[in-house]
Amino acid sequence: MKTFMGNAAVAMAVVSAILALATCGTNGGNTSDSRSAPKIGLLLPDTITARWETQDGPQLEKRIKELCSDCTVERTTAKNDVAFQQEQMESMITEGVDAIVLVAVDARSLRPTVRKAHEAGIPVIAYDRLAEGPISGYVSFDGEEVGKLQGRALLRAMGDKARSGQIVMMNGDPIDPNAVSFKQGALSVLKGKVKIAKSYDTLQWRPEAANANMSAAISALGAGNIQGVYAANDGLAGGSITALKANKVDPLPPVTGQDAELAAVRRIVAGDQYMTVYKPFGPEASAGAAMAVAAARGDSLNRIARDKVTTRDGTEVPAVMLTPISVTAADIKNTLVKDGMYTVRQICTPQLRAACKKEGLT
Ligand code: GAL
């Protein structure tokens, strides 16, 4: 818990600093200058993973408005379609938006469009996923650290079984650069410590694909021969757990996750999922909004960024890199509930009442 307190304090400090800087930039706090009201394009990737539409989208819009009351935000979702996202971004360029916040479906395919925006003088802020091409700034969490937290938690949950047992890995979509970092981080912890019997990459992060892959793994390995499941996010964890239950795997092996989705938090309380990785959306959205507003006003992003990240082109860009937090049942109260992400009432359905009580969630 000490670690979380530290992280929370750091996150708060960063957010206050960001907000202070964003509102006192050269044009900050003076939106009634001669320029016209800035327009910010916000490109989200899909509706499969809950966070984009339920957390990132609304929080980014809210914070942009707080920093710049006359800013307008145009928000789209690409529904996981690369060509559709290219079109959405092209039309924002034609329209002449002042800045773009991009969560790329496929960073590589979007590269020419990012270049086009840059040539049109429109700064692009890569949000959560590192985009390719000439971006102006980046906001995210340390992806390798996410994978390490998941890997370490899985080994801890497996205990002695890690030595003799085996795990199945459900990784994300390799066109998402974060998925590559999560996998790398996890492998750096798991390799040599436990046998990885099967490893799958999951196109479009689809829970139903994880479900089919887990059923195949159970058929190949035998229902009693999976002692742990590395799932890169909560959607994949959910799909895997459904397959384990359908195949009567009892007791369930520990399963990891990421994103602190409400359904996953409930599974953690119920004992079906071991952990999730909480990446506080507030600080990420605050940093993304501050960068977007500064970029739209033509202000420097160096005033907001405390880090630097090197893109695939070898260019250093100003960045805000936040710290992910590992959450098991015992941590829910002091992390997700304390931060106001969910109330105990939201988490604790009538069926979970007894389990909630056991975890001190009352
Ligand atoms: C990643 C993101 C994760 C997860 C995943 C699925 O890029 O960092 O939080 O949501 O995408 O969309």
Image (tube, grey):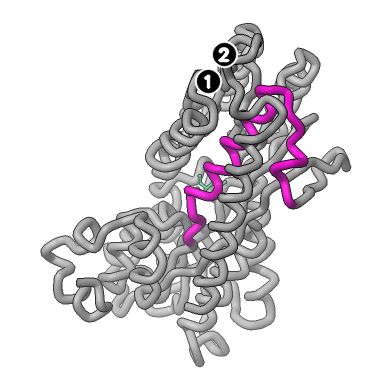
Classed neighbour count for the residue bearing mark 2: other residues with Cα under 10 Å, few (<14), some (14–19), many (≥20): some
- In the current view of this chain or complex, which residue is farthest to the left? 350
Quarter containing the C terminus: bottom left
* Residue at x 49%, y 24% (from the top left corner): 69
Percent coordinates x, y for residue 332 in the rendering = 36, 69
Q: Which span of residues is magenta-colored? A: 278-306
| SS at mark 1 in the image | loop
Percent coordinates x, y for residue 227 in the rendering = 45, 79
* Residue at x 49%, y 62% (from the top left corner): 277
Residue 283 in the magenta stretch? The answer is yes
Q: Is residue 176 above or below residue 3?
A: above
Q: Which mark is residue 210?
A: none
Q: Which residue is mark 2?
A: 37
Q: Which residue is mark 1?
A: 71
Q: Quadrant of residue 224?
A: bottom left
Asked if labels 1 and 2 touch by Cβ distance under 8 angstroms, the answer is yes
Q: Is residue 81 visible?
A: yes
- Label 2 vs 1, first from the N-terminus: 2
Q: Is residue 287 above or below residue 210?
A: above
| SS at mark 2 in the image | loop
Percent coordinates x, y for residue 138 in the rendering = 69, 41
Q: Quadrant of residue 191?
A: bottom right
Residue 361 in the magenta stretch? The answer is no
Q: Nearer the viewer, residue 270 or 82?
A: 270
Percent coordinates x, y for residue 306 in the rendering = 73, 51
* Residue at x 65%, y 35% (from the top left corner): 24
Amino acid type, label 1: Cys
Some atom of ligand 1 lies within 8 Å of the CB belonging to the residue at label 1: no
Q: Is residue 215 visible?
A: no
What separation in Å lies between label 2 and label 1 (alpha carbons)?
Answer: 6 Å
